[in-house]
Image: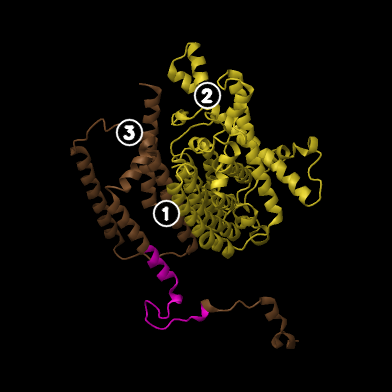
Chain colours: A brown, B yellow
Amino acid sequence: MTIASTTQQICFLVLSAAVVAGSLGVVLLPNIVYSAFLLGGVFLSVSGLYLLLNASFVAAAQILVYVGAVNVLILFAIMLVNKKETLAAIPGLLVRRLLSGAVCGGLFALLLRVAFTTPWALPGPVPVGEEATIRIGEHLFTDYLLPFELASVLLLMAMIGAIVLARRDVFSTDVITGEPADQGLIEKDRTPLLIEKATPEPTLLSKP
Amino acid sequence: MLSTGLLGAAVVAPGLDLQSSFIDLAQNAGLTAGAARLLWLPLPMLLVLVGAVVGVLVSVWLERKISAAVQQRIGPEYAGALGVLQPLADGLKLVFKEDIIPARADTLLFSLGPVLVVVPVILSWLVVPFGQNLLISNVGVGIFLWIALSSIQPIGLLMSGYSSNNKYSLLGGLRAAAQSISYEIPLALAVLAVVMMSNSLSTVDIVAQQTGAGIFSWNIWRQPVGFVIFWICALAECERLPFDLPEAEEELVAGYQTEYAGMKFALFYLGSYINLVLSALLVSVLYLGGWSFPIPVEWITGWLGVSPDAPLVQVITGSIGIVSTILKAYLLVFFAILLRWTTPRVRIDQLLDLGWKFLLPIALVNLLVTAGLKLAFPAAFGG
C-alpha cells in the first residue's frame, strides 16, 4: 500500500466518523447553539469528502454556500432570538420520539438495502480533476439548463417572499390582516436631534 | 493536491521550479519518488507560515510607525533600531499574559472561536503565488478556494461573541457576521470579472494573463472599477478602520474580543493582520500583475543578451518576482494604514447601504460590461 492511498483511507475514515458523530450531535444535543455549530462541522467534513473524491470545485462551493451562508444565517437567527426559557413538556413526548425514531430507522434500513443491492460500477469513472469546473459550467448551461433556471426562479420567489414578510409596513394594506398599515414609520423625516433638543422641556425644568 | 506547475505549463518561461529540483536531488541521493515528495511537502508550508508571521510583524511595526507619523508622534523607538523589535516585544508580552476564561463563559466554544478565525486565513495562503512555481499548491479552484475559506471566519467570530456571555461581544460577533456576508458578494463578483478575463480560477493563470506588456498589461487598467470594489470589500472583510464596527472601541468596548486575553487575544490579532497582508497580496495578484516586474523580465534579458533559462538568471528573476509581489502588497498595506488614520468609521446602516445598494449593483454592472468588452475586444480582454 502506498503512502498516498493510506493517507486517503485515514482521511476517509476520520471524515466519515466526523460526519456521522456530528450529525447525531446535531439531532440529539439539547442545546440548539451547539447543534448549529456542529452542523457547520458536518458541512465542513462533507466538503472534505468531496475533496477526497477529487471534486475540489464542489468542495469549495459546499463550504461557501453551506458553511458561509446557510450555517451563518442559522446561527444568526438563533442568536437574535435566543430566549432563555424552559419549554413545557409536550404531552405524549415519548410516543412522538419513538415514532420519529421508527421513521428514521426505516429510512436508514431502506438506504442500507439500496446501498448493498445496487450493482456499483467499481472502480468508477476516471475523475476529471481540475477540469471539473469547466465541465460543471458546460452541464449547467446545456442539459441541466432547465433545472438550473427553475432553481433560480425558486430562489427569486423565496427572496420576494422574505421581503414581503419582512417589510409589511411598505404596503398600504397589511398582507396578513388586510387592514391599512401604518405608513408613518418609514416615511418619517430625518429631524436633526440636537436642534430638537434645544427647546427645553418644561416638565424637567419645573422639577424642584 | 500538490500539482505545482500542472496548469501553468503552457506559459512562456518555466521559471524557478524548486520542487522538481528538490525531488531530483533527493532521488539522486537514493530515495524513492514518494518519499522525496513526502520530504518536500512540509517545506513550502513551513516557509509560508513563517513568511506570514514575519509579514504580520512587519505590518504591525509599519502600523505603529505610520500611525505615529500621521499623528506627528515618534512611535516605538527603543526596542531595536527604529523600534523594529516592538512587535516581537508585544508578542512576547501576550505569550506571558494570563489566559483568562470568564466564569460564566462557555469554555469549549470560547477556546475554539479564535482557532476558527485564524485557521482559514492561514489555509488561504495555499494559493498565493510568489512566482510561476513558487506557491504551495496551484489548485485549479485557486481564488475560489480563498473566497470559500474566508466565509468560514464569521462562524468563529459568532462563536467567540456568543460564548463570551457578554452583550458587547455578542453584538460584535453579530456585526462581524453581517458585515462579512454583505461584502462577500460584491467581492466575489469583482473577482468573477477578473476570472472571466483570464479564463481560469487559478492564481497562477490570473497572473500569467497579466504578463506581456509589463505594467500596461496589469488588470488595474482593464478593471479599474473592479479594483476599487475589491479593495473596499477586502478592507471590510478584514475589519479595517472605515469598517471596523465589529470591534468599535467607543461603542462595543472591543466587540467579540472583549473577554479575551493572552494567547487567545493574540490569535485574533494575528488573524486580522495575516488577513490584511493576505488581502493585499491577493489585490496585487488579481490587479497589479502579481510577481511580474513593471518592465517584463524577458525584455530585460533580451536587451542584456542572456538566456532566461540560465540557472543564475532564473534565480535572479525568481527573486525579482518575490520582491515585487511583496513590494506591491506592502504598498497596499501602507494605503490601508493611511486610510485607517484618515477616514472616520461608518455607521452600521451606512455600511450595509454601501454594501447592498451601491457596491453590489456596481459590481454587477462591472461584470456585465466586462462580459460585453470580452465579446467585443477578445484580444484585449482575454477572449
Judge depth for marks 2 and 1 and give the one in front. 2
Q: Earlier in the sequence, mark 1 or mark 3?
A: 1
Please indicate, yes or no, whether residue A16 appears anywhere in the rendered image: no
> Chain letter of disc 1?
A
Label 1 packing within 10 angstroms: few (<14), some (14-19), many (20+): some
Total marks in image = 3
Residue A181 relative to residue B321: left or right:
left
- Residue A195 higher or lower than B49, as above or below: below
Residue A49 drawn in magenta: no
> Chain letter of disc 3?
A
Q: Residue at x 39, y 83 (%)?
A: A179
The residues tagged by marks 2 and 1 sit, at their Cα atoms, a distance apart of 41 Å
* The quarter of the displayed image where residue A131 is located: top left
Contact flag, marks 2 and 3 (Cβ < 8 Å): no
Foreground of the two, B313 or A5: B313
Judge depth for marks 2 and 3 and give the one in front. 2
- Residue B354 higher or lower than B334, as above or below: below
What is the x, y in percent for residue A28? 37, 51
Label at residue B17? 2
What residue would you read off at disc 1?
A: A70
Q: Please name the amino acid that badge 2 sits on.
A: Asp
For the record, the magenta segment spans: A158-185
Residue B174 relative to residue B251: left or right:
left
Q: The N terminus of chain A lies in which quarter of the figure?
A: top left
Label 2 packing within 10 angstroms: few (<14), some (14-19), many (20+): some
Question: Mark 2 falls on what kind of element?
Answer: loop
What residue would you read off at disc 3?
A: A127
Residue A181 drawn in magenta: yes
Question: Mark 1 falls on what kind of element?
Answer: helix
What is the x, y in percent for residue B38? 47, 23
